[in-house]
Image (cartoon, grey):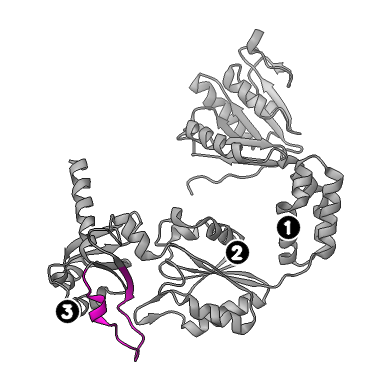
Amino acid sequence: MRVFLASIPMDDARIIIVGSGDAALAKLRLFGQTPAEVVWFAPGGAPVGPGALQGGPAPIERRPEAADLIGARLVFIAVEDEAVARDLAALGRAAGAQVNVVDRPALSDFHTPALIDRDEVVIGVATGGSAPILARDVRSRIEAVLPAGLTSVAKLARDLRDTVIASVPDFLARRRFWEKAFRGPAADLAAAGQTAEARREMLRLLNVAAPEQGVVHIVGAGPGDPELLTLKALRVLQDADVIIHDRLVPDAILERARRDARRLYVGKARAEHSVPQDQIEALMVEEARAGHRVVRLKGGDPFVFGRGGEELEAMRRAGVPVFVVPGITAAIGCAASAGIPLTHRDHAQAVTFVTAQEKPGGIAPDWSRLAAPNHTLAIYMGADRAEQTAANLIAAGRSPETPVAIVENGSRPDERVINGVLSDLGGLVARSSLTGPALLFVGECAAFSAAQLDVRAELVA
């Protein structure tokens, strides 16, 4: 985070604006609807005619002196002469104010964000002064989707805030109350201007507010690209109290979650289980029974080699309400990103997802079935068994010249695709020095990724 947007109360604040041109007028209009005391110094005289300010404070047609700035919270300086701007900024800081010199970020203590002003609700978009036009464009996009009655909803919430705190001392119950209020009929009524009806609905909700039963959502995070999260997964993440996540979930996805949610890492790698599976399930039950909304966040899809089925059974046995939010499984996401069609009319009439890590003491894969022609294999957790997997497939009848592809960090910015043939699969893995999650694809369709890489190289050239 390069800049931090602070919320500064305007009640009893003193704002000083210095300048006579358009930039100064823009700042005056910005603060025209605030309860702050706004003082305007216009050393060059106030504009007249069509460009004059309508309403607002009367201009003081001189430069401010040190005594004029005492008690100011914010000082905006919009003058052309840089030396004058520096002198005025020094006076403002000496008076204890925060100073903004318009269009001169290096001279400023803060930058003015692009603001969406809905009275009680103010949204800011900032770029640290580097791209104000971009900030304005983002602001316009956000403003277009905000409901027109947002201000009325926020005013009603302010009026009831102390009542809610007194009536619902439990923090989680209070949060649930506000979520219901802001997402249900009360908010709709307030937005429509039916304030009395909205107030009655909020008070009705308040009378039944109580700590809720916890719930678990087993959520698929997809292969790693945060834009591949489903809308439902994103909504659940932003509602979560606790997020229990795996090693394969990148920070880019965790950043989409509610910021104050507790994050519990229970990642696993082969032969390195930070938290055993039974303890993960016990943790999920414990957090849900404490009344929390728990998200068990797993890479890919929780029901494809993700042990989501075991966790679902554990929640049901414990009597914990549980829901599953599917994700784009790694094979589909990585194949699409690498340009590998999993089926193709000319090359593959079937696709199989298989793990190279069978359960200890479990049944080995049926290699004769997996080695069938016109068939794509997507092999999970197969990098450290690549040589033996290739040998088993060849022994079962698959051609040693069958195309293969290794997709490391599929769908992520550091994605890497390595192509070769089945007989050299172990060597490909060894030479590639893999460090991220990788899937192996075997079959004629795997050659499509090499063709895509050739096209990319031609475009770059």
Q: Is residue 452 left or right of residue 323?
A: left
Tell me which residue sits at (46%, 71%) in the image: 302
Visible residue check, residue 121? yes
Task: Give yes or no for contact between labels 3 and 2 (Cβ–Cβ under 8 Å).
Answer: no
Return the residue at label 2: 240
**Between residues 369 and 124, which one lies in front from this camera angle?**
369
Which amino acid lies under the numbered mark 2 shown in the image of this protein?
Ala
Tell me which residue sits at (53%, 39%) in the image: 126
Near mark 2 (Cα within 10 A), the count class, few <14, some 14-19 or many ≥20, is many
Q: Is residue 338 left or right of residue 253?
A: left
Visible residue check, residue 110? no
Q: In which quarter of the image is the C terminus?
A: top left
Tell me which residue sits at (53%, 33%) in the image: 136
**Magenta segment boundaries in residue numbering:** 351-373
The label on residue 391 is 3
The span from disc 3 to disc 2 (Cα, nearest Å) is 46 Å
The label on residue 298 is none
Near mark 1 (Cα within 10 A), the count class, few <14, some 14-19 or many ≥20, is some
> Quick one: SS at disc 2?
loop
Q: Which residue lies furthest to the bottom in this view?
A: 361
The span from disc 3 to disc 1 (Cα, nearest Å) is 58 Å
> Quick one: SS at disc 3?
helix
Near mark 3 (Cα within 10 A), the count class, few <14, some 14-19 or many ≥20, is some
**Between residues 157 and 10, which one lies in front from this camera angle?**
157
Q: Whole-percent x and y of residue 139?
A: 56, 36
In the rendered structure, which disc, 3 or 1, sits on the residue that comes first in sequence?
1
State yes or no: residue 340 in magenta. Answer: no
The label on residue 180 is 1
State yes or no: residue 352 in magenta. Answer: yes
